[in-house]
Image (tube, coloured by chain):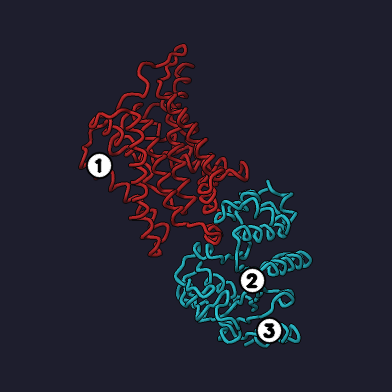
Chain colours: A red, B cyan
Amino acid sequence: MPNAIEFTQSIVNGISVGLIYGLVGIGFCVIYNASGIVNFAQGVFVMLGGMVCQALLTSLGIPLILAVVLTIPLVALSGLLMEVAIVRPMMNRGATLFAIILATLAAQIMVERITLLTLGDRPRTYEEFTSGGPLKLGDVAIGYQLFWILGCGALLVLALWLFFTRTRSGRALRACSQNREAAQLLGIPVARMMLLAFGLSAALGAIAGILVTPTQYTAYNVGTPFGVNGFIAAIIGGFGRAGGALAGGLLLGVLQALAIVVLGAGFKNVAALSVLLLVLLLFPNGIFAGFGPNAKAH
Amino acid sequence: MTGRNTAAEADPLLRAEDVSARYGHVQALQPTSLVVAEGEIVTVLGPNGAGKSTLLRALTRLVAGRGRIYFRGEDVSGLPTHKLARRGIVMVQEGRGLFPQMSVRENLVIGGYLQPGEVDAQMKAVFELFPRLRERLDQTAGSLSGGEQQMLAIGRALMAKPQLLMLDEPSLGLAPRVAGEILSTLGELNRRGIGILLVEQKAPLALKLAQRVYVISLGRIVAELKTDEIASYHDLARYYLH
């Protein structure tokens, strides 16, 4: 049995990675709410966020802040491209949602393979945003990057909440999620809202990738595990509920970290999928589905 | 049916020519023409499944269809739904089409999506018509009573400053007194210059309000009548059985 310090340390690690899952989960929700599509290429945006930022930092040698500022719109652009080149043409041709979802999965594999062929399979990383550390609290070590993840994650959640509740476009996106026809009848351009959703979702994935890469590494294939765990986080929280996805991500991250110290690293995914099965059995609409009428997309 | 001959204006508020719609292989609406003149209330009556709702959905391009649609003489046939709203054609859907998880205030604010600078003024005007909505501002739309939901649906449509308001069964599921109140509000809106195209099952209520009636049966318009020409509601029954 692990001791209290190992427990505490694993919870700290779990919160860090859980927040990333939560951000990926929110990305799933944003697109799902605007279009009804589950974008299985969501993890690709996390991979691209880390890859592009790493390339800008090491190949071009530009400062971190500039690399971050450039990476986010570049990856967001890939989200827009996916909507314009894959999703919209299929929708316009009357493809079923299942077919479109399958196409996003194909897009994920395609982008991974292109990345592998062009950049190789070498794992890449870059330094934490703040050098030094880790911070020692007794015997518990907390890397500075965790504070960046927590701080940026909190700011992002606040920004998203403000966007969805205070801005014209954010409200319009929520309106699309609740009744797309009614939204159109009030003059809301639903197609443009979908484009916005894909761009926003990709930007969220990029930020998650930029934040998490210094704590581990990025490679052509990291998108899949982040995508799967983000998807599980979204389901745990009640698919479509951004706040639920964040909470689901934190829960999942902590449970995975605890599973590693208690049962061993091999049980990480067993824990994640067990939690998913349990939630689906006990709360088919997600743990947080009934926690307030305004929970959706907040 | 040629609505053109019965409406005097050269450029009526709405003129639909041979508008039709299909759901897959099913022709839900045969080529249909109708006219709504400026300042007019027109109602479309017909039995269940006659194609009344499909007609409104075809006119607002919620369902793909053929035919030409002119709004104040401008050909708007190729415009998507949201651009028709920009022209002033707004529809209240059957079942109200609210955003149930949003508050009354948010529903109204989204209703003013096209008029972001006039939201407060428009909301004030909506509260004058429906004072009860002011008392429910922070309540979610889904928690309102049926009558309040219908008030909100109409109020939200008014936020978009419509010139032509289409309503699909606004009295559906409402107590007769509430349905009467809602329909009399439509009369008030019409006096303020908004043209109204009303699809209604409750013929007696609709006939009190409208100036003209189209009767639709089996996906086609089978009669066009002025309400003052209809001696009794039972006169319409023969068209229903067409």
Determine the secondary structure under disc 2: strand
Q: Which one is nearer the viewer's eye here, A277 or A112?
A: A112
Q: Quadrant of the C terminus of chain A?
A: top right
Q: Which residue is mark 2?
A: B196
- Residue A235 in the image, given as x and y percentages of width and height: 49, 43
Q: Which one is nearer the viewer's eye here, A273 or A23?
A: A23
Classify B52 as above or below A184.
below
How far apart marks 2 and 3 lie (CA) works out to 15 Å
Determine the secondary structure under disc 3: strand
The answer to which image quadrant residue A89 occupies is bottom left
Between disc 1 and disc 2, the foreground one is 2
Classify A250 as above or below B136.
above
The label shown at residue B226 is 3
Q: Are marks 1 and 2 on the same chain?
A: no
How far apart marks 3 and 1 lie (CA) works out to 69 Å
Amino acid type at image mark 2: Ile
Determine the secondary structure under disc 1: helix
Outermost residue on the top side: it is A138
Give the chain letter at badge 2: B
Q: Which residue is mark 1?
A: A115
Give the chain letter at badge 3: B
Q: Is residue A185 visible?
A: yes
- Residue A266 in the image, given as x and y percentages of width and height: 36, 30
Q: Are marks 3 and 1 on the same chain?
A: no
Q: Residue at x 64, y 68 (%)?
A: B194
**Crowd around label 3: few <14 · some 14–19 · many ≥20 (10 Å):** some
Q: Which one is nearer the viewer's eye here, B242 or B55?
A: B55
- Residue B10 in the image, given as x and y percentages of width and height: 55, 81
How far apart marks 1 and 2 lie (CA) works out to 57 Å
Give the chain letter at badge 1: A
| Nearest to N terminus: mark 2 or mark 3 | 2
Amino acid type at image mark 3: Lys
